Image (spheres, rainbow, N blue to C red):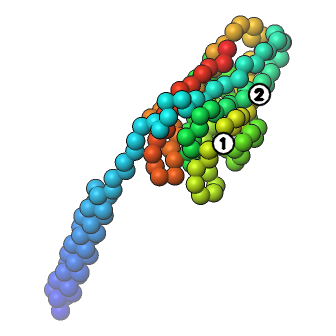
Amino acid sequence: MKMRKIITGLLSLAFVFSMSLNSMAFAEEVVTEVEVVTTQAKSEEFVISLGTVDVEYADQDQVVSIPVSVDANPGFAAALIDFALPEGMEIVGLKDGLITDLAYNASRVIWVNGVSGDFKENGVLFYVDVLVPAGSSDLYEISVISHEESFVDSEYNTCVPDRKSVV
């Protein structure tokens, strides 16, 4: 009787183990069949630019608002914009422009369109508030870093903009 319980237990364990292996194999099959296709820029004139800001020397940290604009917008539904900031500077806030509901960290801004379709307007997208450390008295260049998939439209096509820096 004791041996029968052990064999029944071992068979149950083997059945559960084989079901787990089948589930894992099936899950792997599904993952390997996923394919995302993206394309390059729709417009060679698509430009993301930063406005010029003058900052006076100060003994205290300052926050400056820099406009981030788009021209020849081919339309996008999501954006990931990285900024190359000089040492000691970081993004500390955002102000709405044509787009709202942005997220950010010290050097990146992310936006996803909350409605269906692509955003196609031109103009100031938003203002990025940058902390300028006390004692800064030089010219600094802040630029936008474009990745291949920084701007994606509602059909998952990528749009790679040209970019203009601010000094």
Please state the horizontal and vertical placement of residue 156, each as a whole percent of the image: 46, 49
Q: In terms of secondary structure, where does tag 1 sit?
A: loop
Please state the horizontal and vertical placement of residue 129, each as a whole percent of the image: 74, 30
Q: In terms of secondary structure, where does tag 2 sit?
A: strand
Please state the horizontal and vertical placement of residue 59, each as a whole percent of the image: 84, 12
* Mark 1 crowdedness (10 Å alpha carbons): few <14, some 14-19, many ≥20: some
Mark 1 vs mark 2, CA separation in Å: 21 Å
Residue pointed to by mark 1:
121
Which quadrant of the rendered structure holds the C terminus? Answer: top right
At x 15%, y 86%, the residue is 3
Which quadrant of the rendered structure holds the N terminus? Answer: bottom left
* Mark 2 crowdedness (10 Å alpha carbons): few <14, some 14-19, many ≥20: some
Residue pointed to by mark 2:
65
At x 25%, y 74%, the residue is 19
Q: Nearer the viewer, residue 28 or 116?
A: 116
At x 60%, y 41%, the residue is 110
